[in-house]
Image: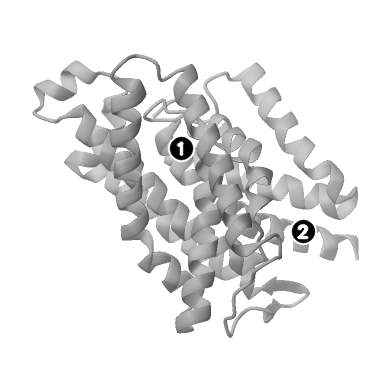
Amino acid sequence: MVLELFLNAVVAGILLGGFYAAVALGLSITFGQLDIVNIAHPAFVIVGSYTTYIINESLGLDPILAGVLATPIFFGAGVLLYRFYYVSFERTGQESLSGLAFFFGIMFIVEVVLIMVYGVDYRLVEADYIGKTISFGFIIIPIRMLAPFLMASVMTLGVYLYLSRTFNGRAILAVSQDRLALQLMGADPVKIKQLALGIAVATAAVAGSLLIIIGPVEPSVGRLYIGRVFAIVILGGMGSIGGTMTAALMIGVVESLVATFYGPSWAPAVGFIILLVTLAIRPQGLFGRA
C-alpha cells in the first residue's frame, strides 16, 4: 500500500513538474538570459489562461490549441513590452529598481483588470479528456495532468533547439554575456532582446492554457507561482533550459511526496529548502549559467 502511494506520488510529481517547467520557461529566458527581473511573468500566464477560456467558450476549441493560436498575439505584446521597457528604463540605466517596479505594476494592473472584467469567480474550460484517467496497474494518471506535461515537454524541447541551433537563438544566449561581441557578429542587441521577450511572453500563453486545464483559475492565482518559478530558474542554473526542466521536475516530485505523506501545506516550503541547500553547495545552480 505504501509503495503504491509512493509511486503514484512520484508520477504525479513528474507530471506537475512538467507544468512547472512550462510556467518557468519564459522566466528562464528573461531573468536567466536577459537579466530582466520580470516579476509579472505569472500574470502573463493568467492572461493566457483567460484567453484560452474565452476561445474555448466561444469557439469550442481544445484548450491547448487555443493557447497555441494565441501565441502570435502574446509574442507581439512581448516585443512591444520590451520596446517600452528599453526606452523608459534600460536605455537610461534605470532598469534595476525602476524596471522592477514597472513589472510589479504590470502584475497588479493585469490582476485588477481581470477582476473588473471577470470578477473573482473561478473559470474553467471544457475538453473531452478533462476528468478522465488512464491506468497502468495501480498507477493512475489523470489526463488533465498528462496532456499539459506532454505539451510542456514539446515546448521546452522546441525552445531549447531554437536557442541552441539557430543564429538568433545563440544571439539570445550571448546578449547578456558579451554585448560588444554580439554587435561585431552583426546582431542588434535591442532587436535580439525584443525577440527573446516576445518568445518568453508567448510561452506564457501556452503555460496559461495548461494551467486552466489542470484546474480552474481566478485573477490572483498567479501570485502562487511567483516565488516558485524564480526558485526553479535559479535552482536549474540561470538561463539553462535543461536545468529549468530538471529543477521543475525535482520540485514537482518533492512537493508531491511531501503533500502525500506530510500534508500539502508543507510542500512549497520544501521546494525552497532544496533551493537554499543547492545554492549553499553550488551557488551557480545545478547546471550553471547558460
Q: Residue at x 15, y 29 (%)?
A: 188
Question: Observer-nearest residue: 154 or 30?
Answer: 30
Question: Observer-nearest residue: 183 or 246?
Answer: 183
> Is residue 22 in view?
no
Horizontally, residue 108 falls left or right of residue 119, namely left
Say which quadrant the N terminus sits in.
bottom right
Residue 193: mark = none
Label 1, on which residue? Answer: 28
| Amino acid at dot 2 | Ala
Residue 104 locus on image (x, y percent): 55, 33
Label 2, on which residue? Answer: 9
Residue 4 locus on image (x, y percent): 83, 65
Mark nearer the N terminus (1 vs 2) = 2
Colouring method of the image: one colour
Secondary structure under the numbered disc 1 in the rendered image: helix
Q: Residue at x 20, y 35 (%)?
A: 191
| Amino acid at dot 1 | Ser
Characterize the local packing of mark 2: few (<14), some (14-19) or many (20 or more) Cα atoms within 10 angstroms: many
Distance Cα–Cα, label 1 vs label 2:
27 Å
Residue at the limit of the structure toward the front, as seen here: 116
